[in-house]
Amino acid sequence: MSDSRYQVDVSVETRFLAEQSQPEHNRFAFAYTITVHNNGELPAKLLSRHWVITDGDGQVEEVRGDGVVGQQPLIQPGQSHTYTSGTVMTTKVGNMQGTYQMLGEDGKRFDAVIAPFRLAVPGALH
C-alpha cells in the first residue's frame, strides 16, 4: 500500500531448535522472531495473522488466527512489537510467508505483508 498512513514493515529472524527436533522421526522444530514496525503515520492494531507454511516436499499448511501469541498489540507510529513463535515441519527445509491484518486508528483495515523466509536445518543447504 502506498498510503503513508499505513506503512507496517515486518522483519524475521529464524533458528533451528535441535533440542525440540527428532530427525529420526522427521520432526524439525524452528523458532522465528518477528518484529512488526509501524512506519506509518497512525497507530495500528494487529488484529489477526495468516501464514502459509510450505515444507520441502511442497506440502502447504495455512494457519489463521487472532493476533500473535495471544496478543493484539497496538503499535504506535515509529514503534515496533517483537515476539517469538515456532513451527514444526517434517522436512529439513521449508518456508513461511503471510500477512498480518491491521486496523488503523482511523478504522481502516489493511494488510502488512510478511515476505517469504526460509526455515532450514544448519548444513541442509549447500
Image: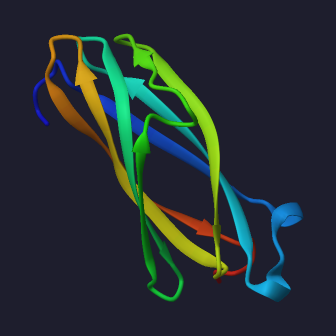
Front-most of residues 31 and 126 = 31
Q: Quadrant of residue 41?
A: top left
Q: Quadrant of residue 83?
A: top right
Return the x and y of residue 62 as percentages of the image width and height. Answer: 40, 64
The reply to whether residue 68 is in sight is: yes
Quadrant assignment for the N terminus: top left
From the viewer's perspective, is residue 69 above or below residue 21? above
Q: Quadrant of residue 78?
A: top left
The reply to whether residue 115 is in sight is: no
Q: Residue at x 53, y 65 (%)?
A: 118
Q: Residue at x 72, y 65 (%)?
A: 29
From the viewer's perspective, is residue 74 above or below residue 99? above
Quadrant assignment for the C terminus: bottom right
Total numbered labels: 0
Q: Residue at x 56, y 32 (%)?
A: 70
Query: Farthest residue toward the right?
Result: 19
Return the x and y of residue 75 as percentages of the image width and height. Answer: 41, 16
Residue 41 horizontal side relative to residue 98, left or right: left
Colour pattern of the rendering: rainbow
Residue 57 horizontal side relative to residue 23, left or right: left
Query: Farthest residue toward the left?
Result: 3
Return the x and y of residue 43 as percentages of the image width and height. Answer: 30, 12
